[in-house]
């Protein structure tokens, strides 16, 4: 399974809501509501995107995979669906909501009692084709990490000028892993 | 002050210990004790480095700056000093220690009652010369973020193979902001 361990995946997925809560709740909006420029996300937007992923991406795709195998492609996921998800809400409300939907997703995942043979089953991703359940679930965890990585980059960007010559020493300010800058 | 706001800096610095605690405590060692290859840090190492920075970098340098201005360069900081700092300790112990030393640093920072004119004062960095207190303190916050960014990258690296074709979609796996890979 390429080093995928379902218990390790669940351990990580369980911690992300509290991690984001500790980092972001009641933090000044300079940190949480600014982005990296036009067409990019703020930390607030990212939390909305994570909520949207719980509703429309991870467990829904796992269910489609288990039910239909490769005969049904997963429904496409709207990467800007978080805009609708977040409208009129405070960051505190989004953090509560993320904790709640994540907890339900994990209850559902545990209830599947997946065996190794289940993890090897295949579904069909709309863009790149065959994908195993193991890969989908490992990606769920790595997706949490990519957004924690992105949030720390978005936040550091707000101090790009303030740090002066120190910017050369801060890897986060050199990262081109996501979109611009 | 290039958008540096001392209260925002303190708000962020206050949250980092709880953020790392929520993310890392009792997580399987696959996530916390593996690195990205020879000569790179694990999440465990990064927490040791952050503790070391509290003891030897941020407030000590701020004090030197306020006392001596540009006449004294800051003492060089040992980027591998965390090895000594972490020896024989568990990750839980390091997380407790980080919370404790950070809390003391912030008490000390608040007790300075810094005014805007203090923030404009200059010291001398051993590598790149003149630096303002404002830049030093903004960098302290951005340094927390660069290491949160790095930790999320180190952790995601452990699932580089497990995610299969999804890797193309995960920005954290494309990041070259820090050292190899």
Image (tube, coloured by chain):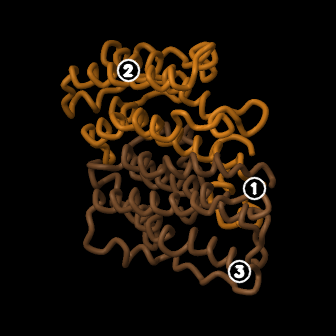
Chain colours: A orange, B brown
Tell me: B43 left or right of A45: left
Q: Quadrant of residue A142?
A: top left
Residue at the spot 48% in from the left edge and 38% down from the top edge = B165
* Chain ID at mark 2: A
Residue at the spot 21% in from the left edge and 34% down from the top edge = A116
Q: Quadrant of residue A58?
A: top left
Front-lying residue, A111 or A154: A154
Residue at the spot 67% in from the left edge and 57% down from the top edge = B138
Front-lying residue, A11 or B52: B52
Q: Disc 2 vs disc 1: Cβ atoms closer than 8 Å?
A: no
* Chain ID at mark 1: A
* Chain ID at mark 3: B
Residue that numbered label 1 is attached to? A162
Q: From the viewer's perspective, is residue B72 above or below residue B147? A: below
Residue that numbered label 3 is attached to? B127
Tell me: A27 left or right of B69: left
Q: In the image, residue A135 lies at what x, y percent?
A: 38, 35
Q: Confirm whether residue B160 shows in the render.
A: no
Q: Secondary structure at mark 1?
A: loop
Do marks 1 and 3 share a chain?
Answer: no
Q: Which mark is residue A100?
A: 2
Q: Disc 2 vs disc 3: Cβ atoms closer than 8 Å?
A: no
Q: In the image, residue B43 lies at what x, y percent?
A: 40, 58
Front-lying residue, B88 or B111: B111
Residue at the spot 28% in from the left edge and 19% down from the top edge = A108
The quadrant the N terminus of chain A occupies is: top left
């Amino acid at each position: 399974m390429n080093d995928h361990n379902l218990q390790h995946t669940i351990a990580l997925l369980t911690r992300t809501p509290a991690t984001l809560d500790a980092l972001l709740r009641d933090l000044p909006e300079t940190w949480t509501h600014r982005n990296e420029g036009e067409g990019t996300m703020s930390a607030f937007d990212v939390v909305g995107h994570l909520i949207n992923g719980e509703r429309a991406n991870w467990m829904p795709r796992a269910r489609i995979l288990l039910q239909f195998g490769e005969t049904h492609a997963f429904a496409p996921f709207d990467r800007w669906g978080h805009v609708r998800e977040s409208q009129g809400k405070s960051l505190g409300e989004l953090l509560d909501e993320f904790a709640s939907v994540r907890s339900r997703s994990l209850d559902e995942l545990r209830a599947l009692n997946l065996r190794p043979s289940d993890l090897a089953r295949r579904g069909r991703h709309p863009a790149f084709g065959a994908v195993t359940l193991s890969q989908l679930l490992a990606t769920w965890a790595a997706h949490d990490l990519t957004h924690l990585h992105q949030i720390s980059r978005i936040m550091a960007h707000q101090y790009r000028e303030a740090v002066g010559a120190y910017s050369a020493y801060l890897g986060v300010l050199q990262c081109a892993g996501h979109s611009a800058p």
